[in-house]
Amino acid sequence: GRYVLEKRDVNLPTAVVSPVIERFRHRFDERDIQLILSDECSEDQVIRLVLDRGLISQVLDNLLSNALKYTEPVPDGDGNGNGNGNGEKYVTYGWKVLAEFFGPSEPGIRVWVTSSGSSLDLNEPMDVFKPGFRADNVAHKAGTGRGLYFVRQVVELHGGRVSYKHTEDGNEFSFVLPFEQS
């Protein structure tokens, strides 16, 4: 299959992020997972860029769906997913303009989803974006290993990049799109 981009000028926070977040909010509430907009972002912030709204919405949808499925309590000091004693589970999300990410006078817009829990068992961080890949420590959960591959395909089709990193309390998936404006 091939994806055909239907790029249009959109405001990223209101046209993509907010609608996807609202579709998931009740599901996160049901699982007692805090859904937190990063302090450096504002829902009324205007970030206009040219992208395929439907496909990028599906990318964010996939990242949030994975976060819903795999979020665990904050790991304790030993790296166990037992939490810090209060069972806190959270997902943070946000966006940020990165000046010259793609080169001189070529900014990018970074969108991320970070969830609490144990780190993925990976030899290479980019393995999670390969078709059919399933980390050993999450293989017991339902999934096909195709979702993050889809994320990579769509982001790269837009001229962007994907990434994964383990954070102090969990896992962060992000993508950077060229800050293309009309």
Image: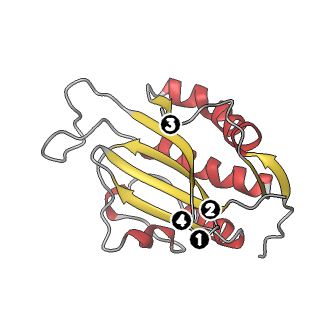
Q: Which residue is mark 4?
A: 162
Distance, label 4 to label 3, CA atoms, is 21 Å
Q: Position of residue 173 (x, y in %)?
A: 47, 55
Left or right of residue 122, residue 159 in this image = right
Q: Is residue 105 above or below residue 96?
A: below
Whole-Å distance between the Cαs marked 1 and 3? Answer: 22 Å
Answer with mark 3 or mark 2, whichever residue precedes in sequence: 3
- Which callout, 1 or 2, points at the residue further toward the start of the chain? 1
Q: Which residue is mark 1?
A: 102
**How far apart are the two marked residues, 4 and 1, measured between alpha carbons?**
13 Å
Q: Does residue 145 appear in this view?
A: no
Q: Is residue 109 left or right of residue 88?
A: right
Marks 1 and 2 sit apart, C-alpha to C-alpha, by 6 Å
Which quarter of the image is occupied by the N terminus? Answer: bottom right
Q: Nearer the viewer, residue 179 or 26?
A: 179
- Disc 4 residue type (three-letter): Val
Q: Nearer the viewer, residue 128 or 145?
A: 128
- Report x, y in % for residue 111: 57, 51
